[in-house]
Amino acid sequence: MPRPGPATRELRQVSTAFRMLARAFRTFGSVLAAAESQNGASSRGTRQRRKPRLTAEWRLALKLQGKYMGTMRGLKPRQRAQVKKVRATKGVRAAIAAAKRLAG
């Protein structure tokens, strides 16, 4: 049987290196999972995002914004422009009412 050439040896070395690298990544993943389960830290980082405190006024504003955006979804571009003009002059509540009228 002929001796393997230098290219064959190099391919075998590269293949072995990739196998070792894959094994290292598998081990690293299990180590991260174990560390996460031990201290309760998320994999995204240890900083947790604080839940915002919503006042009643802010909650109402968000609700109105959602209602406005929901009514705008079904409108055609020309109707949207009309509603935006109403919002600029008379406010969000009037714009919602106008959007409902235009929607049908």
Image: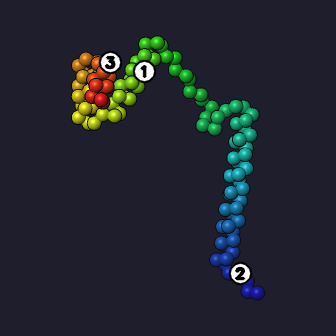
Residue 30 position in % (x across, y down): 73, 46
Question: Above or below — where is 19 with respect to 94?
Answer: below
Residue that appears at 71% across and 41% down: 33
Quarter assignment of residue 40: top right
Residue 57 position in % (x across, y down): 43, 13
Residue 46 position in % (x across, y down): 63, 31
Query: Dot 3 surroundings within 10 Å: few (below 14), some, or many (20 or more)?
Result: some
Of the two numbered discs 3 and 1 on the same chain, state the one appearing first in sequence: 1
Residue that appears at 67% across and 32% down: 41
Q: Name the residue under label 2.
A: 4
Residue at the right extreme? Answer: 1
Residue that appears at 66% across and 67% down: 14
Quarter assignment of residue 9: bottom right
Per the model, the C-alpha gap separating discs 3 and 1 is: 11 Å
Please name whichever residue, 32 or 72, is drawn nearer the observer in this view of the structure.
Answer: 72
Of the two numbered discs 2 and 3 on the same chain, state the one appearing first in sequence: 2
Tag shown at residue 63: 1
Q: What residue type is labelled 3?
A: Arg
Residue that appears at 60% across and 37% down: 44
